[in-house]
Image (cartoon, grey):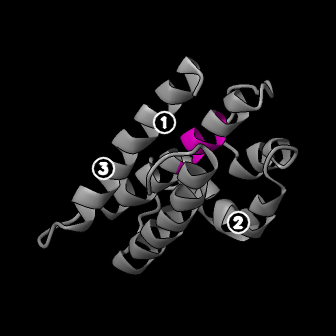
Amino acid sequence: MKPIAAEWVAKAEGDFAMMERECQVQDKANYDGICFHAQQCAEKYLKARLCEADVPFSKIHDLVALLEQVLVAEPAWETFREDLAYLSDFAVTFRYPGESSDRESALDAQSRCQLFRKAARNALGLKT
């Protein structure tokens, strides 16, 4: 794996670990944080795969836009379009006052992230 892709994977795994830990909290879990880290994990895995495929990308957080770019290398990832569109909103939506996530949305984000992470790690030749 290219060093830059490995760096993206390491960052993605940090977000994944944060999301998974926060999902274990029984009292006052940070649902906004779970959603944010689910989005961040997916974003970083998309960028890791783009790096591996030598596909340049800009500094964006739109997971569907990143998906469009990575489909050249991973056409089967089209099946994740709906999940990535769902997660994409969490880059900003719950980061500021006015809107908050709930347990149901957070667990949905976690599940979608877990599924995409598994596919991304498989594509990158990593253990799942």
User: Can you identify the residue that label 1 sits on?
Assistant: 9
Dot 1: few (<14), some (14–19), or many (≥20) neighbours within 10 Å? Answer: many
Q: Is residue 116 left or right of residue 70?
A: left
- Amino acid at the residue labelled 1: Val
Q: Is residue 32 above or below residue 72?
A: below
Where residue 83 appears, as percent x and y from the top left, is 65, 68
Magenta span: 42-47
What is the quadrant of the N terminus in the image?
top right
Residue at mark 2: 80
Looking at the image, residue 86 lies above or below residue 117 = below
SS at circle 1 = helix
Task: Say which residue appears at 60% left-offset and 59% top-offset.
Answer: 119
Q: Secondary structure at mark 3?
A: helix
Instruction: Examine the residues drawn in magenta and state their main secondary structure.
Output: helix
Q: Is residue 40 magenta?
A: no
- The residue where tag 3 is placed is 17
Q: Tags 2 and 1 in contact by the CB under 8 Å rule?
A: no
